[in-house]
Image: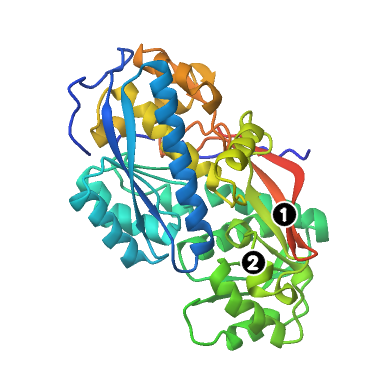
Amino acid sequence: MAALALSTGMIAAGCGDDNEGGSTNGGSAGADVGELKVGVLVPLTGDLSPFGGPASDAANLGAETVNQAAKDAGVDITLALTTEDSKTDPQGAQEAATKLVESDGVSVIAGPMASSETIPVAENVTVDAGVPLISPSATSPEVTGLEDNGLVARTPPSDALQGKVLAQVLGEAIGATSTVNTGGRNDAYGTALVEEFTKAWEAGGGKVGVNVPYNPEATSLDSEAAKLAAGNPAAWVIIDFPDSWQKMGPALLRTGKWDPAKTWTADGLRSNDLPTKAGEKVTEGMQGTVPTSLDAPAGKAFDALWKAQVKKDRQTYDAQMFDAVVLYGLAAVRAGSTDGTEIAGKLAEVSGAPGTKYTFEQLGDALKAVKAGEDIDYEGASGPIDLDANGDPASASYGKWVYQGGKLVDSDEVFPVTGG
């Protein structure tokens, strides 16, 4: 196991109608909630569509887990989910979020997934409406600084951390003073992660030969691919999504100068079916980093639950979506309310210290504890979470993965990241 000690920044605050049980303040007891309407906003179409279906499955699994645990524990809360397609599109995501808030009357939203969706949805829809959102995968550092009245949170760590991890593992593989070429989709995710990697890479003595941002919606990426492939670098760092890689990968291959086995990337290109959809010629040997739950107390238990209940292949960020939904259940009971602002104000309380640690396997006990006013620390299926004042996880772990033999292969090496 490799260790990496890093620092993060510092959630909270967050619409719906008050439940008759009222809200809770400070250390007072929680209360029964009744039905909590949860909007699920995921990309069922568009560049991130390989992630949307599994994320929807994960949200459903989270709701089923909360509802069954509440029933067993005698706590009155039922999560009722409404799912909309964000289309991996900022405008489409805003339209879907507006429907969830204004037509469906949700109190909280789990999603969106892309940073380029999450930021405008928060700025133009949910913050003004007083509806909190928890993204399971929006990792751009720009999310941290949103003026969101404490209504935006996320279960994965910021790419301010992943950029450093990626620089470390690449340096160990090719030498920290090597020259690499960088490129990525020109949006909140790609641009920010390339920037964070570059800062860490150059701080360690490495050099960047050329950086090529590109529009994934362009008709052709041949010109950008030619620039990216030039100069005989020791490696490439390219940040993209699965659907758009089916355009950029072949364009790079046509240059005759690019090698996927010398290409590093991150969570956005980690997908079980990418070698089949894009082809092994543009994926074989490609490797990257991703937030991992391998060392999470409930990581193996969640994997078993997924296989038993969902019975499909897992996908990146399914555990993070599961945790987002579970956190809403715990925070609603802690608040004793379906009001989104009050629920958001309790997310940090139920996700971190102080308090007795509970995983989803002890969720019934956790719900009884929050209703009784006891401090709890939910240990997520994706990791410890521990939401800070900006709605970011204060700690996390990363793993490595590679496409090998046409399949996605995860390493068992874990890089813990400690907050502070």
Residue 329 % position (x, y): 37, 30
* Left or right, 211 with reference to 401: left
Q: Which of 82 and 96 is in front in this view?
A: 82
Q: Is 264 left, or right, of 86 in this rendering?
A: right
Position of residue 86 measured from the top left corner of the image (x, y, whole percent): 37, 61
Q: Distance between the residues labelled 1 and 2?
A: 13 Å
Q: In the image, residue 13 lies at what x, y percent?
A: 31, 34
Q: In which quarter of the image is the N terminus?
A: top right
x 41%, y 39%: residue = 390
Q: Mark 2 points at which residue?
A: 274
Tell us which disc is closer to us: 1 or 2: 2
Question: Colour scheme in the image?
Answer: rainbow
Q: Mark 1: which amino acid?
A: Trp
Number of disc labels: 2
Amino acid type indicated by mark 2: Leu
Q: Residues within 10 Å of mark 2 (few under 14, many from 20)?
A: many
What residue is rendered at 39% in x and 22% in y? 71
Residue at which label 1 appears: 401
Q: Residue 230 versus residue 13: which sits nearer the camera?
A: 13
Residue drawn 76% across the image and 69% down it: 284
> Which disc, if any, is residue 249?
none
- Residue 406 pos. (x, y %): 75, 66
Residue 108: which quarter of the image? top left
| Dot 2: element | helix
Residue 237 in sight in this render: no
